[in-house]
Amino acid sequence: MAPNATTSKLTIKSTLPPKCPHEVEKIDSKSSEITKVLFETDVDPFEDEKLAAAIAPASIPEKRKIELVWRNVIAFGILHVSALYGAWLLVTSAKWATISWVVLLYMFSGFGVAAGAHRLWAHRSYKAKWQLRVFLVFCNTLAFEDAAFDWARDHRVHHKYSETDADPHNAKRGFFFSHMGWLLCKKHPDVKEKGKNVDMSDLKRDPILMFQKKYYLTLMPLTCFILPTIIPMVVWNESFLNAWFVGTMFRWCVFLHATWFVNSAAHIFGNKPYEKAINPTENLGVSIVTFGEGWHNYHHVFPWDYRASEYPGSGLNLTTYLLDRFAEIGWAYDMKTVSPEIIEKRTKRTGDGSHTTWGWGDKDITEKEKEAVLITKRKE
């Protein structure tokens, strides 16, 4: 990370509520060392321009030689070739029951990552009874994106050091790297170092989660590969080729890419109605394929909101809709949200003006006029 000699040591004032477990941090701009936790939401360019200037250079990725992990390169190469063959079989010979099976497993996988690894375990944005946690662990294992414990650890690092070298899928290094390239090469040393210091004691106390982690190498092949292949062959007499290449390889590959779009597309393409000084964006397409995970500008500003969006549960936020149904039967509870008043204040103060309710109100407004408004806001 690049040093900045314009300031000495600055303390970031957290914008998070008192009960939120996240820490705040101090940055020494001379040494560029991060001592605790950095959230991009802690930077308000309207209130502290010097602070924003001191943090900006830290997001410039270090130029270093990429060291490929050839085992992963070969494995993902085989996966994509298999998925392409599966796509051909899907339109030429797979039974409708198999196509429906792919959709069902895709939805289960999405719920396991979005509601489980992400909103429950990474952010603790709500609490879940053991019945829901067991179901979420099953769905998460089906998704095969690593054990939920490890997924949550990497995601906490991503939020604490977003768009820096410590971010596992730093979008500053380009679309391909943030999409899947980060899985094909060795991690930056900062990722490993910061990952070791993330507090995971809360998840270690969850016996269901730790059971998954302990037996993951047994549970994952059975859940993600073996059962999805055998069930179509036994229940509706599907061929092995269709069951394996369509029901397993094609389905898993498509789901992986949908999830990866949150790290890539939703950090590059879209508007920033809540905070224009950060990379994450609101991306409708990503939200559709990930059941509500693409409202990313909001999520990085208010990471503790179980909805991961300002919008209530709907077709554009299916995960929230399902969590609300589980809340009705008592399996999900203590759902954390952000009040409309706080959302409005933050949007008006730091947004890019694209919010449908509290935006600029005139699509024809010029950039010069917008800048004049921002200058006025800074003086207020």
Image: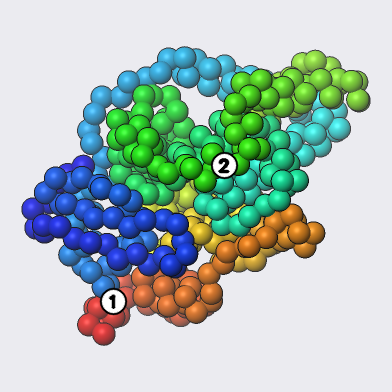
Residue drawn at the location 60% of the way across and 34% of the way down: 210
Residue 69 percent coordinates (x, y): 40, 18
Please say whether residue 231 is visible from this viewpoint: yes
Please state which of residues 163 and 205 is positioned toward the viewer in this rendering: 205
Residue drawn at the location 76% of the way across and 59% of the way down: 330
- Quadrant location of residue 90? top right
Crowdedness of circle 1 by 10 Å Cα count: few (<14), some, many (20+)?
some
Nearest to the eye among marks 1 and 2: give it: 2
Residue 320 percent coordinates (x, y): 66, 58
Crowdedness of circle 2 by 10 Å Cα count: few (<14), some, many (20+)?
few
Residue drawn at the location 67% of the way across and 52% of the way down: 128
* 172 relative to 281, above or below: above
Amino acid type of the residue tagged 2 in the rendering: Arg
Quarter of the C terminus within the rendering: bottom left
Q: Tag 1, which secondary structure?
A: helix
Residue 173 percent coordinates (x, y): 33, 38
* Marking on residue 200: none
Left or right of 292 on screen, residue 21: left
Amino acid type of the residue tagged 1 in the rendering: Leu
First in sequence: mark 1 vs mark 2: 2
Residue under pointer 2: 205
Please state which of residues 316 and 362 is positioned toward the viewer in this rendering: 316
* 13 relative to 71, above or below: below
* 133 relative to 307, above or below: above
* Marking on residue 374: 1
